[in-house]
Image: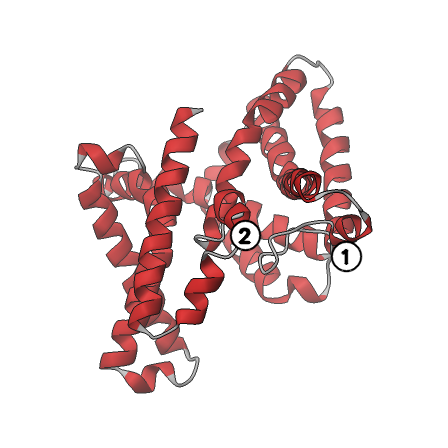
Amino acid sequence: MQRIIVPYLFWSGFYLISKSIIFLMNDHTSKIQKLFFAPLAIILFGAASYHLYFLPLLANRTLLLCLANYFSQKQNSLALLSLFSVLSIVVYQLLLTSNNSFDLDTYTAFDKVLDSTSATSWNYSILRILLVNLSWILRCLPYFLISILLNRFLLQNNYKWLYKQQTAVLLFFGFLSINIMGENFIPSAVNEIAIAFLLLLWGISISHYFKDNKNNAVITNLGLCSFGIYLIHPLVKSVVEIIIIKLIPPLTQSVSLTSILVYSVSSFLISWVLVAVLLKNKVFSQYM
């Protein structure tokens, strides 16, 4: 538990300080007040930085490990996993369509349930925490179950087809097609999950061709830095935005392929370099 709480508190405090400095530099004092207005949201719901709201999900790992252990002991686990995977997708779709999913603006979930309660402030806070975590679990459950299902299926069947060039091409174009047009034809939950797993399978498929590559050290380093990049990139994006506004103002006046590439590629590379340097430090490496 310490390995979860300490990095979480470190990054929450780090982003509170860094965001405050950035807001001060841009004369956005109102945003600073909003940042510190809701301590519960800062500690548990990611108000310090928008992507940190996923970290409390690590506290639910015991439930997920129990489920994984349960399915591993069942002989007919493929049938059970398939059934529960479908049910979890249906529940997630209902969560989205009913507008009960986690709202990053208000840091709440199941708003209608919260609005109907007449509980005290303390009980309201507890209920709010439970409902937010329930929303997160329902959102992650399809990914968790389908991951176990895919792993079991690949282990029980010949998976060499996954490493064929034709498979890699089909997975890549399937990912592009659904990513571009999927939301117009299929439910949002199915669209979101399909994009994620097609990209995952494509990554596994092409990884076969990088095993003996001379650039394997670069790929290994990227893998080691990936979580740190995930944690630090919002701050880097804010700094890159300030620099681009100062140096290349026309680039920020409209959204274009050039502006997106400059913004995203520079943010990614700077984040990668920073994390690679910080990982060499014994103090900072334990938080990444």
Secondary element type, mark 1: helix
Q: Position of residue 254 (x, y in %)?
A: 42, 84
**CA gap, disc 2 to disc 1?**
31 Å
Please indicate, yes or no, whether residue 157 appears anywhere in the rendered image: no
Give the number of the disc on residue 214: none
Write the residue at 36% across / 60% down: 19
Please indicate, yes or no, whether residue 189 appears anywhere in the rendered image: yes
Instruction: Give residue 151's quadrant in the image.
Output: top right
Looking at the image, which is closer to me, 168 or 284? 284
Give the number of the disc on residue 97: 1
Q: Position of residue 171 (x, y in %)?
A: 53, 50
Q: Amino acid at mark 1?
A: Thr
Query: Left or right: where does residue 26 sit relative to residue 121?
Result: left
Write the residue at 69% across / 57% down: 188
Q: Position of residue 185 (x, y in %)?
A: 73, 63
- The N terminus appears in which quarter of the rendering? top left
Q: Position of residue 9 (x, y in %)?
A: 39, 39
| Outermost residue, right side | 116
Q: Amino acid at mark 2?
A: Leu
Q: How many marks overall?
A: 2
- The relative height of residue 66 versus residue 8 in the rendered view (above or below) is above
Q: List the residue tagged with mark 2.
A: 170
Q: Are the residues flagged by discs 2 and 1 in contact, CB closer than 8 Å?
A: no
